[in-house]
Amino acid sequence: MSGEPSQADSRSVDTASPHPADGTGVAAQTAPGGTHPPQQPATDAAYPAYQPNVEGTYPIYRPGPDGTYPSYPVYPPGYVPPQPDRLTRLVTRVHARTPRWLAPLAVFGCVSAAAGYVLWADPAAADANATPTCIVKYLTGFDCPGCGGTRAVWFMMHGDIANAARHHAVLLFATPFVAYLYLAWAGKALFGWRLPSWEPSSRSLIWFLAAWGIFSVVRNLPWEPFTWFFV
């Protein structure tokens, strides 16, 4: 009859399993003859979503009686999670109570203070024969990986890109990327801006550090054209 399901239709019902790998799907719970066994209760009433695996060593998250997963950490019965120490609790409280706008403004204030000091000190006007303040250069006579960075910043603030590259080419290259990362972060925290996100990958960071290391060696070579980088 047209109002009754055919035998082929009854065989095709409940054959799809949404979770065939772990045996929790419909097909895995279908008994011979097409009937469904009753839902097994949880192993512990206090932990409705906890069920041990075959070895009973770690929890497997199952949906509760209402079909939803818990929104809280689920631990085995009798397990007491470790409590955070005093320092962790202090940092957590400070982070929770700190306004979102404070961190971007604090970073901006520190960078502005450093830039103001560079403008006031005018490191580019130092005598070439003056005693170096870098301990590596003072003891060895070689430029360290950071030598020339302050003078490069001074030249960048005055628009002298050539001299900025001569004093620290790697810093000149990295400055626009760091500035964009700060602008995207601070703009989102302060004004809700949604700038295109960019996060440097691990490979790009490795290449950057390798280029910085090569530059630190090349700038100390005692022949042309590498002596142009010697500061």
Image (spheres, helix red, strand yellow):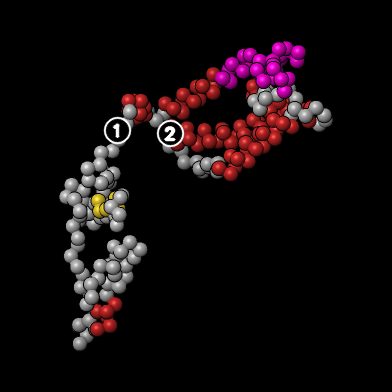
- Residue denoted by label 1: 83
Identified at 33% across, 61% down, the residue is 22
Marks 2 and 1, the one that precedes in the sequence: 1
Depth check: 169 or 32 in front? 32
Q: Position of residue 42 (x, y in %)?
A: 20, 54
Position above or below: 114 against 178? above
Depth check: 128 or 206 in front? 206
Which of pointers 2 and 1 indicates the residue nearer the eye? 1
| Viewport quadrant of the N terminus | bottom left
Give me the disc on residue 15.
none
Identified at 75% across, 27% down, the residue is 220
Label 1, residues with CA under 10 Å away: few <14, some 14-19, many ≥20: few
Task: Give SS at disc 1.
Answer: loop
| Viewport quadrant of the C terminus | top right
Q: Position of residue 151 (x, y in %)?
A: 67, 21
The quadrant where residue 86 appears: top left
Instruction: Look at the image and tell me whether residue 84 can be seen.
Output: yes
Amino acid type, callout 2: Ala
The quadrant where residue 221 appears: top right
Instruction: Look at the image and tell me whether residue 160 can be seen.
Output: no
Outermost residue toward the bottom in this view = 1
Q: Position of residue 41 (x, y in %)?
A: 18, 57
The reply to whether the C-beta atoms of the residues labelled 2 and 1 are less than 8 Å apart is no
> What span is colored magenta in the figure?
114-142
